[in-house]
Amino acid sequence: MSLALYVPRSSPAHRTPAGAKVFALLALSVLVFVLPTLPVALAALAGVLVVGLGVARLPAALLARQVRVVAVWVLTIVAVHAVLTDLLLGVTTAVRLLALVLAAAVVTATTRVTAMVAVVECVAAPLRLVGVRPARIGLVLAMTLRFIPLVAERADRIREAQAARGGSRRGLRAMTTLVVPLLVQLLQLAHTISEALDARGADDPASRRVVREAA
Amino acid sequence: MRIRRRHLVPPEADPSRGIELVGVHHAYAERTALNGIDLRLTEHRVGVLGANGSGKSTFARLLNGLVVPTDGQVVVDGLDTRTAVREVRRRVGFVFQDPDAQIVHPTVAEDVGYGLENQQVPPAERTERVAEILDRYGLAGHADHPAHLLSGGQKQLLAIAGVLVMRPARVVFDEPTTLLDLVNARRIARVIAELSQAVVVVTHDLELLEDFDRVLVIDAGRLAEDGPPEQSIRAYRKLMADR
């Protein structure tokens, strides 16, 4: 399993600040919903392809993969509209969805996780007022991306180990026998990760120190 | 126990004191992990041997305050791990056995930069130091690669780079070669041998400790041997053979 989202390149799209890209994505989403016509949706799709393939020089296969992921939904939308409303509306909705999915893929592929995390931290900054630390939210986001493949890998290892001893790899029983050992492994992993975060200064605000004293 | 917040002047470190353990006892609930450890470590390279469950990982964790002893005192370069844990952690880097548990960011360069962010190193200097350390450990070509796609040896190098980039005064390694093949284990051994920092290495890899200055053997939570590598390795082999 790969979450290799960022595609390193030296392009104007890569150099554009993450906040500006997220804002552009937001603006595009609003535009295609405020002006729900086929020409606008097609123009948005064309613009995204020009930026993605022309400016950012992303591999066409990367965008094609994103299209494949939503292909079933796109076709379903067209079919449902063709039957219930009209084909033109279905095509417009489908093109709009494709444009937004590809735009999100372009933003993700041209933005480092740390830059995206910085945007999230910036957006979450007002939460400081209620005692939430935005840096923690950013760290959670980065760690989620980091550990999804690791959790999938651990689950695969458990499935293989069970299959090697005659266990089933499919069905409800396989799921239940997977969940408990996976949970135990993840709890152990979480403990070590928390130690690793401490060891690398995760809780090291230079300005404030906590002193524990016996009462 | 109550928690009191107050602003303090960070305590001063005194590297000449080395690592001091005074009457250290540590227990996890009913299980005693370490009992009656009194030591002073001033050598550049110290190895720690012991069977599984002997208490050696607990010993390693005591040295940068990941574990605070139930009784007794651990003082690193004059800093008590109980009262100056943040200063201790800044001085003592810790490399875990499983690099997967230590790599917390999705890509290689981002993960190496994580500790520097915590130290509030300015972005330009951060980028420079990350590039420098990735180059030193042959990971420069992987800077933007997803960390989970690296080989086991590369992951361990990345974990080490993520610690060394913070420029600790000392580094503690907890079984750094256990999950590696022979080639990568030797590679990590060379990395450790070339470090300018004082190191403490907990391991089962006897070859790794042959050139060390001092080797401790921990057995059932107690110090069973303490001496030059040859003497301690012999004692460790005998201890294992007698089981």
Image (spheres, rainbow, N blue to C red):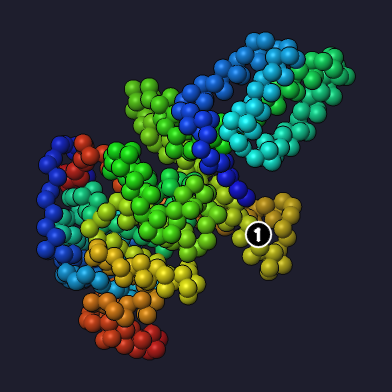
Q: Residue at x 74, y 37 (%)?
A: A68
Residue B67 visible? The answer is: no
Residue B109's x, y, as percent?
43, 47
Residue B125's x, y, as percent?
30, 42
Return the chain for callout 1: A
Q: Nearer the viewer, residue A60 or B48?
A: A60
Query: Looking at this rendering, what residue extends furthest in the right direction?
Result: A83
Q: Residue at x 19, y 43 (%)?
A: A211
Q: Quadrant of the C terminus of chain A?
A: top left
Q: Nearer the viewer, residue B84 or B136?
A: B136
Question: Amino acid under label 1?
Answer: Arg
Query: Looking at this rendering, what residue extends furthest in the top direction?
Result: A35
Give above or below for A58 relative to A89: below
Residue A66 picture quarter: top right
- Locate residue B32 relative to residue A117 in the image: left or right: left
Residue A164's x, y, as percent?
68, 68
Residue B164 picture quarter: bottom left
Residue B47's x, y, as percent?
29, 73
Q: Residue at x 69, y 64 (%)?
A: A163
- Per the image, the residue denoted by label 1 is A159
Callout 1: SS: helix
- Locate residue B152 relative to residue B8 in the image: left or right: right
Residue A119 visible? The answer is: yes
